[in-house]
Amino acid sequence: MRSTSRGWMSRTMTPVDDRPGPDRRGGSLRTVVKRRRGQPVRPRLTDVAAIAGVSIKTVSNVINGYEYIAEETRTRVLDAIDEVGYRPNLSARNLARGRAGVIALVLPKLDMPYFASLAREVIEEAERHGWFVLIRQTHGELASEREAIAGGLPQRIDGLVVSARGLRAEDVRDRGDDTPLVFLGEQYPAGVAPHVGIDNVAAARTATEHLVEIGRRRIAMVGARADVPDDQRTSGYRAALEAAGLPVRAAWMSPVEANSGEEGERAVAELFTDADEMPDAIFAITDWVALGVVRALHLRGLRVPEDVAVVGFDDIPYGRAVTPALTTISPDRAEVAAGALELLEEQIQAAQRGERASPTERQVRFRLLVRESTAARQTPG
Amino acid sequence: MRSTSRGWMSRTMTPVDDRPGPDRRGGSLRTVVKRRRGQPVRPRLTDVAAIAGVSIKTVSNVINGYEYIAEETRTRVLDAIDEVGYRPNLSARNLARGRAGVIALVLPKLDMPYFASLAREVIEEAERHGWFVLIRQTHGELASEREAIAGGLPQRIDGLVVSARGLRAEDVRDRGDDTPLVFLGEQYPAGVAPHVGIDNVAAARTATEHLVEIGRRRIAMVGARADVPDDQRTSGYRAALEAAGLPVRAAWMSPVEANSGEEGERAVAELFTDADEMPDAIFAITDWVALGVVRALHLRGLRVPEDVAVVGFDDIPYGRAVTPALTTISPDRAEVAAGALELLEEQIQAAQRGERASPTERQVRFRLLVRESTAARQTPG
DNA sequence: CTGAAAGCGCTTACAG
DNA sequence: CTGAAAGCGCTTACAG
């Protein structure tokens, strides 16, 4: 029985599974034969094709949205898909297409709320592209980042989305692997691969300007990087102060060793060595650091925002749940994820044509969210 | 050129790719032919076999850890794998094995820190089983949970790991799908599928006993569920009070509508209607709720822990970063994830044998982490 | 202990 | 617009 010779077939008929081969046994697909090789039977393209009375090529075309299919044929195929509850086998599809169906997301630590929510966006966006996401944590270590971009995974992947810490351009050039790669976030080697992120200079400047606007004049930055001359958030902070005619004091730029509450707490101590010159506002390089800053201020008996206003950066979910709720810069993470995967797709297509995609730069939006840590708050009841 | 006729081959020789077929072109694997069908060439089992001078079956056996392979053969194969940098194609492997290579993790919301870190553990553990994890968010809605367990995904999956809210036993029985399923966490329909979690009664009791031990006598519970007679955390709270001979007062059991800081904040208001009977301690049903509780107490001018001690539940990362750091119950999430996937694997194997695995119950450990919200804290400097 | 070959369920040139 | 058939890269009975 060939499907071509059967033509249209009633929906209520049960197709007979009579393909040859050592593993096949005769019998009705949906009744007698419930398992092949010990696996429960799932309907395949062949089953849909048999019911619709077309070839599997046609079913495949319908599923993949090819244009030139007779409307009647398409309806018949879609009905057949519904009837048997067909769902494609992605392993088979990816194998046939020469795709792995997997991309790797390389980031410092999934436990950090910023990366947790970024990962969520990337995972959701990746599903739309037919990708699963393999998450690799580097803990911000250079060796680990190098390994991740050098193809050190135990399986094949179609691409890499990387949120780096210490990677330099030569690390990327010498990685000895040609898996398409896209960088995310603030720290990344420029000019060697596409990148998507917000304008960190503008965002830091917006955060600092907000502190100026609410009347603060002694504005410190916790997490400032004096060692990196062109550090973006530090540059934005400086720019805002200079534009407002306020002093940029080295004593008010306190670095952190890590993105943690503990570091924020520790850094605050350095700001308060000279009692005459206590800051009345702090721009913290991340929300996580800002939480530590607030904590340190509270422990010294200072009120936020009355004595010291605080702005964070990242918009992590806890920022809303703590007292005081944190004012922060909120990058559009959905846009970051969507942009990254779009650039990755471009890279992959370029590689298939044997080309090398140019290191595109793509900027996404951010917003300043004003909350209690810089605004008047509810009076204690 | 058949590999059998070549026997041992020097590592430095370059195997010639001369397989027949319309897509094949002659030429050296690693030099001339760098792409097949537009895809970059990746070494395959065949390439490894050719270099090692064995059949692909043998290479496959080595990779999959079969026992009876001559030591010399194994070494040769492993060297060949190293030489060409072979990495298996999981799509092909899963297709051949009849596995999807994907499981779904169904949970309320990935943004919630508890679920974020649970997801991380599940993802890491799943990789060890060769699975990718597809995350489905239900936002705690029953309809969405039902759909998730009814096989409503656009692709095939090998199993489901579900953290439910409102699912009942009949929802599971009538789901019209037989994908293996494991439940996680506190709320789950009993007796219809395997489950892994901590002993919530014992954990809530431990949390409450801690408050008794530090001398508190008026212990309230925010998030208590008076409506659910056998709610586990509420039961543990009651049990601890009764064992200590302390009153169980309905007025001190304040429910929450959702697991959020806002709800915790709102619930505290209800506890302080009668000034004579103000609680001196609060057991909050989750850390997230506890953050709101602390916030509400601060806004009323109450100190934590001096005036009111607070214990949370879940051990979310922020618990350490806030002021005061939260005392909490910490479930062993790694054990939860490992247990869930082990039970899932059992289910799958049972299904392959045509059996139905029994709804095993597996308990994992928890710890009480004592931090500032119930202990003496650093004095403001 | 190892080989030769079928099969997993798709996609896709190649024909018609 | 649609079919017949090869091929994707593995695993695995079946032989030896």
Image: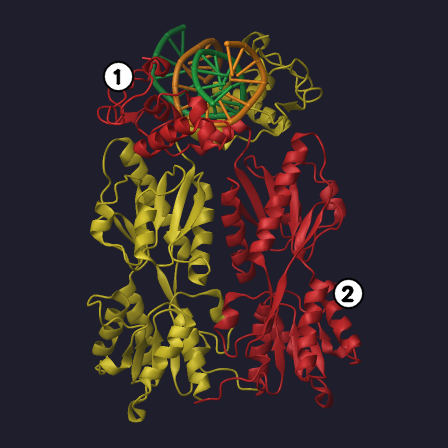
Chain colours: A yellow, B red, C green, D orange
At 20% from the left and 50% from the top, the residue drawn is: A170
The chain to which mark 2 is attached is: B
Query: Left or right of A105: which side holds A78?
Result: right
Observer-nearest of B323 and B154: B323
Which residue position is annotated with label 1? B26
Disc 1 element: loop
Crowd rating for badge 2 (residues with CA inside 10 Å; few <14, some 14–19, many 20+): few
Q: Residue A320: x percent and y percent? A: 49, 70
Viewer-side residue, B372 vs B312 = B372
Q: Position of residue A315 (x, y in %)?
A: 42, 66
The answer for how far apart the CA atoms under marks 1 and 2 are is: 74 Å
Residue B306 at x, y = what percent?
59, 87
Badge 2 amino acid: Asp
- Foreground residue among B247 and B144: B247
User: Where does the N terminus of chain A fall, quadrant-wise?
Assistant: top right
A61 vs B328, left or right, is left
Q: Secondary structure at mark 2?
A: loop
Label 1 crowd (10 A; few <14 / some 14-19 / many >=20): few
For residue A365, the mark is none
Q: Relative to A164, say whether A200 is above or below.
A: below
Residue A297 lies, with reference to residue B100, above or below; the image says: below
In this figure, what is the number of numbered marks? 2
Q: What chain letter is assigned to the residue under label 1?
A: B
> Label 2 belongs to which residue?
B227
Residue B317 shows up from this direction: yes
In this picture, residue B126 sits left or right of residue B22: right
**Which comes before the other along the chain, label 1 or label 2?**
1
Establish whether labels 1 and 2 are both on one chain: yes
Camera sees residue A70: no
